[in-house]
Amino acid sequence: MLDECIFYLKQSIALISDPKFYKSKKVSVRNRRVNQECKLKLQLCAILSQNQNHSEALENARKSVRLSHLMFKDMEELC
């Protein structure tokens, strides 16, 4: 069951990371995409950790932190 969740989360991350998914180049749209991708990566991190795949979970957690930093920079730019 967890393997199926991992599969679908990875597919969702690949879909949302595709530049064609959000066609607008506005900062607010990019912020929404980054926010959603960050949440998906954290969910994937939790499930990978439950599945005893801690190294890949840590990698996704680090990517999520980088995305959240990007999101804060975008918010600062919007202000």
Image (cartoon, rainbow, N blue to C red):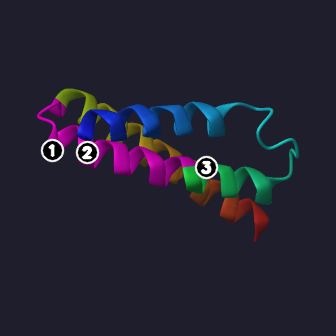
Disc 3 marks which amino acid? Val
Nearer mark to the viewer, of 3 and 1: 1
- Residue at the spot x=52%, y=46% of the render? 67
Q: Residue 46 in magenta?
A: yes
Q: Is residue 22 left or right of residue 65?
A: right
Q: CA distance from mark 3 to mark 2?
A: 20 Å
Disc 2 marks which amino acid? Ile
- Which residue is tagged 1? 50
Q: Is residue 46 left or right of residue 12?
A: left
- Which residue is tagged 3? 34
Neighbourhood count class around disc 3 (C-alpha, 10 Å): few under 14, some 14–19, many 20 upward: many
Q: CA distance from mark 3 to mark 1?
A: 24 Å
Which of the numbered marks, if any, corresponds to residue 77? none
Say whether marks 2 and 1 touch (CB < 8 Å): yes
Q: Nearer the viewer, residue 59 or 7?
A: 7
Say whether marks 3 and 2 touch (CB < 8 Å): no
The span shown in magenta is 37-54
Where is residue 60 drawn, in percent x and y? 36, 36
- Image quarter (top left, top right, bottom left or bottom right) of the N terminus: top left
Where is residue 73 drawn, in percent x and y? 63, 55
